[in-house]
Image (cartoon, helix red, strand yellow):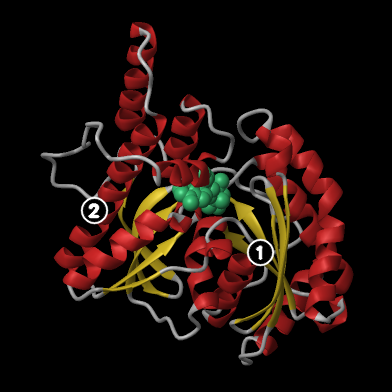
Amino acid sequence: MKYIDIANEKLDKIRQRDDIVVLAIESSCDETAVAVTCGRKLLSNAIASQIEIHKRFGGVVPEIASRNHTMAIDNVTKEALAKAGMTLADVDCIAVTYGAGLLGALLVGVSYAKALAFATQKPLIAVNHIKGHIAANYIAKPDLQPPYLCLIASGGHTTIAYVKSLDEIEIKGSTQDDACGEAFDKVARVLGLPYPGGPQIEKLAREGKPSIELPTPYKDKDTYDFSYSGIKTAVINYAHKLQQKGEALNKADLACSFQEKVTDIMVNNTLRCAVDMGVKRVVIAGGVGANGVLREKMSQRAHALDIEVFYPPMQLCTDNGAMIASQAYNMIKCGAKASNIDLDAKANLRVWE
Ligand SMILES: Nc1ncnc2c1ncn2[C@@H]1O[C@H](COP(=O)(O)OP(=O)(O)OP(=O)(O)O)[C@@H](O)[C@H]1O
Ligand SMILES: [Mg+2]
């Protein structure tokens, strides 16, 4: 019998159970992450972060990321299994992020997962990274049920998605240029803050006031889309003008003004969309979802509109294996087929694919 037939036969048996054990691998950017889950329960969540390695370059260097994933992946997998108190024999299936992300980085996880799945003859589940970010919420809140509206705010995406069911999403708005996380990182660079910029801006902004006027994109347009390049350019121009005039820049005020502006836009678009659609539940996903001001603002304004808000704990907002395991579980429950050994990484995989 061929591998794929064995895998699908096994998958059809395990999908009847609620205690499916998933070992999930995530390597799309600069975190080598492996998690083990049993149903919606997180058993272990091992992460080898490369942030310190990429810091000196001011951002992720793809080739260096791939090399470090290769070095870390075996140990991180062993660590995840050990923390879960399991061996590979206890695992029902192997899940892996196959896109979107850095191609070389994705390929490390995909190749490793394929080898594990084939060697153990266990089903392989190919997971979309962004759907994984959304699914992190089910680990944190196992009784969460669609439909709901999700703001995906990450390093490469800013999207409002209507999550209709566990395997159906509809895009309501997206960034037309930079992602919000990318804007945080670029603005942090201008302010001389280290990578990744989001948490650094949040920290510095606590000492500042939102006193600097920045543009509001699509002010007169009826859209849920986003644009961050104009705000980013306005911040850069503001800093450069002061520099040219030899005047001191109040970095904390600029960080605070930037953060206020981008979080206002995210919250306004999401809640306007929720109200227009009559949706009463809003969920936040992705790395920028760790931002306290975004969480607070969304919760407060939603409360006034009688809309419920949920977001995962910070460590489940940025890249992790648990979110990939959670989405694999959803896929299995929705009847997904196993991937074959010719599974390829897809750098530009879109949110809805
Ligand atoms: N507290 C915070 N405030 C704002 N931004 C934050 C915070 N913490 C992390 N970020 C930002 O989140 C981003 C990383 O998120 P994430 O790991 O989800 O992105 P990614 O995986 O690189 O991109 P994607 O998920 O779109 O492929 C970075 O841009 C980082 O600056
Ligand atoms: Mg991510």
Badge 2, how many Cα within 10 Å: few under 14, some, many 20+?
A: some
Relative image position of residue 146 (x, y in whole percent): 37, 77
Above or below residue 143? Residue 302 is above
Tell me the number on the disc at residue 23.
none
The answer to whether residue 337 is left or right of residue 84 is: left
Relative depth, front residue between 254 and 178 = 254
For label 2, the SS is helix
Above or below residue 271? Residue 219 is above
Say what amino acid the circle numbered 1 marks: Gly
Relative image position of residue 334 (x, y in whole percent): 51, 79
Query: Can residue 300 be seen by looking at this rendering?
Result: yes
Q: Sequence order check: which comes first, mark 1 or mark 2?
A: 2
Residue at the spot of label 2? 269
Relative depth, front residue between 204 and 234 = 204
Relative image position of residue 198 (x, y in whole percent): 49, 44
Query: Can residue 350 be seen by looking at this rendering?
Result: no
Residue occupying the point 34% across, 38% down: 258
Residue occupying the point 72% across, 45% down: 50
Residue sitting at the far bottom? 17
Residue at the spot of label 1? 321
Badge 1, how many Cα within 10 Å: few under 14, some, many 20+?
A: many
